[in-house]
């Protein structure tokens, strides 16, 4: 009946369906949740587009992707400039001259570099004294990159909450780089293009799926064999281990729990994203959604506001898998599933869960556009 059945109506699935339809292919999209959009789904509450599954801020250097999405709906000028709250004291992110001034009172790049280099050297000397040549874990990696103060106040507590493990138990590669900016620049991303779609992400997903049969509330895996009889090809964006009935074992994921709250005030925290980096605060951040789309005095045009507290936890059956845990055990297990996937020539495994790899939004779209149409 179909050239392609696409499992998952998130960015990867919706983008591929859009491409396949343009190529004249007959497609069916199946979505397990009761709505399309996956994790970029927004719910309108009191005129505010609430990112139901955490903050999604689009950024890319790929002009083709940027132009494609802006041809669907214009993007606004939102610039991601998060704040860190450590025991009530606020710091700008990413780590830049504003952060260093707030941390130590330094006013010049030379002053900040001197403090950071001294702390980095202390960490390196301690490792050498213990007979260690290179960082063995995330804690040692961070200390040798940014020093003690930044690590203790802005990295350690947040990271341990995010991963549910001590930093000295996490692999060093998780923090591949910790950029230090010796300029007064609070723009979190270095990409050329950045913003939020006007009217929220639902507009983009709806356009990508326009004219394509889409069924929500359907668990493809529950009737996998029957669905696979009805298509020449399957594009699968769900968990790869679940597709193979966990025959090699279960992969680990981190999940998130969200507490949404509507408040009778026009401005709760003055910023879209505030990270809570101490270990005692149970959530990792508070998102105030109206700041994604309203700026300046326009923030008061909507008298209420919606905030979301984000609580990371270990994934368990019934919860949404958000982040792959790319440690040695899980990466090795994924390779076993990858070998099985390569033997399923009629199934294309694409996206964060199917490839057990973290994708940001722009790379997810790029991945979908690279899938060859047959």
Image (cartoon, rainbow, N blue to C red):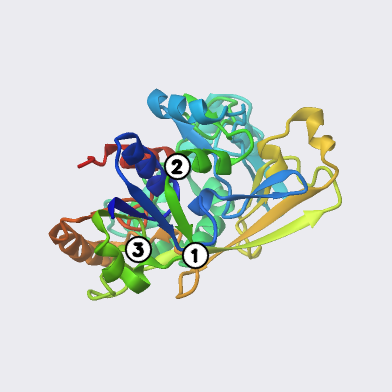
Q: Hey, which quadrant is residue 272 in on the image? A: top right
Q: Which residue is mark 3?
A: 239
> Dot 1: within a 10 Å radius of its alpha carbon, few (fewer than 14), some, or many (20 or more) residues?
few
- The CA distance from mark 3 to mark 1 is 17 Å
Residue drawn 63% across the image and 26% down it: 107
In the foreground, 242 or 267: 242
Residue 226 position, x and y percent, is: 29, 69
Task: Say which element carries label 1.
Answer: loop
Q: Hey, which quadrant is residue 199 in on the image? A: top right
Q: Which residue is mark 2?
A: 211
N-terminal label among 2 and 3: 2
| On screen, residue 60 above or below 143 | above
| Residue depth check, mark 2 versus mark 3: number of the one nearer the observer | 2
Residue drawn 40% across the image and 53% down it: 29
> Dot 3: within a 10 Å radius of its alpha carbon, few (fewer than 14), some, or many (20 or more) residues?
many
| Residue depth check, mark 2 versus mark 1: number of the one nearer the observer | 2
Evaluate if marks 3 and 1 touch, with contact meaning CB atoms under 8 Å apart: no
Q: Which residue is mark 1?
A: 217
- The CA distance from mark 2 to mark 3 is 27 Å
N-terminal label among 3 and 1: 1
Residue 245 position, x and y percent, is: 28, 74
């Amino acid at each position: 009946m179909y050239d392609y059945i696409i499992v998952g109506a998130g960015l990867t699935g919706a983008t591929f369906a859009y491409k396949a339809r343009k190529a004249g292919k007959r497609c069916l999209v199946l979505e397990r949740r009761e709505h399309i959009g996956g994790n970029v789904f927004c719910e309108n509450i009191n005129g505010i587009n609430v990112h139901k599954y955490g903050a999604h801020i689009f950024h890319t250097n790929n002009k083709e992707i940027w132009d494609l999405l802006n041809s669907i709906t214009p993007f606004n000028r939102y610039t991601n400039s998060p704040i860190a709250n450590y025991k009530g004291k606020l710091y700008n992110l990413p780590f830049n001259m504003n952060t260093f001034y707030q941390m130590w009172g330094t006013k010049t790049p030379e002053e900040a570099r001197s403090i950071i280099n001294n702390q980095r050297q202390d960490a390196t000397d301690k490792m050498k004294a213990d007979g260690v040549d290179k960082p063995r874990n995330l804690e040692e990696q961070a200390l040798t990159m940014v020093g003690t103060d930044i690590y203790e106040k802005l990295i350690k507590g947040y990271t341990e909450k995010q991963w549910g493990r001590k930093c000295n138990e996490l692999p060093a590669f998780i923090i591949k780089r910790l950029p230090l900016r010796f300029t007064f620049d609070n723009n979190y991303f270095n990409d050329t293009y950045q913003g939020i779609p006007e009217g929220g992400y639902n507009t983009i997903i709806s356009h990508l799926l326009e004219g394509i049969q889409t069924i929500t509330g359907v668990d493809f895996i529950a009737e996998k064999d029957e669905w696979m009889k009805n298509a020449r090809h399957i594009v699968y964006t769900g968990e790869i281990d679940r597709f193979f009935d966990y025959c090699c074992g279960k992969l680990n994921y981190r999940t998130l729990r969200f507490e949404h709250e509507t408040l009778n005030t026009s401005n709760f925290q003055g910023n879209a994203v505030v990270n809570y980096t101490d270990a005692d605060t149970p959530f990792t951040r508070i998102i105030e959604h109206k700041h994604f789309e309203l700026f300046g005095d326009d923030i008061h045009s909507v008298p209420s506001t919606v905030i979301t507290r984000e609580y990371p936890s270990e994934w368990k059956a019934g919860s949404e898998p958000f982040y792959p845990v790319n440690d040695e055990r899980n990466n090795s297990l994924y390779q076993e599933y990858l070998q099985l996937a390569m033997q399923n020539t009629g199934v294309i495994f694409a996206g964060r869960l199917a490839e057990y790899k973290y994708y940001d939004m722009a790379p997810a779209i790029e991945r979908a556009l690279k899938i060859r149409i047959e």
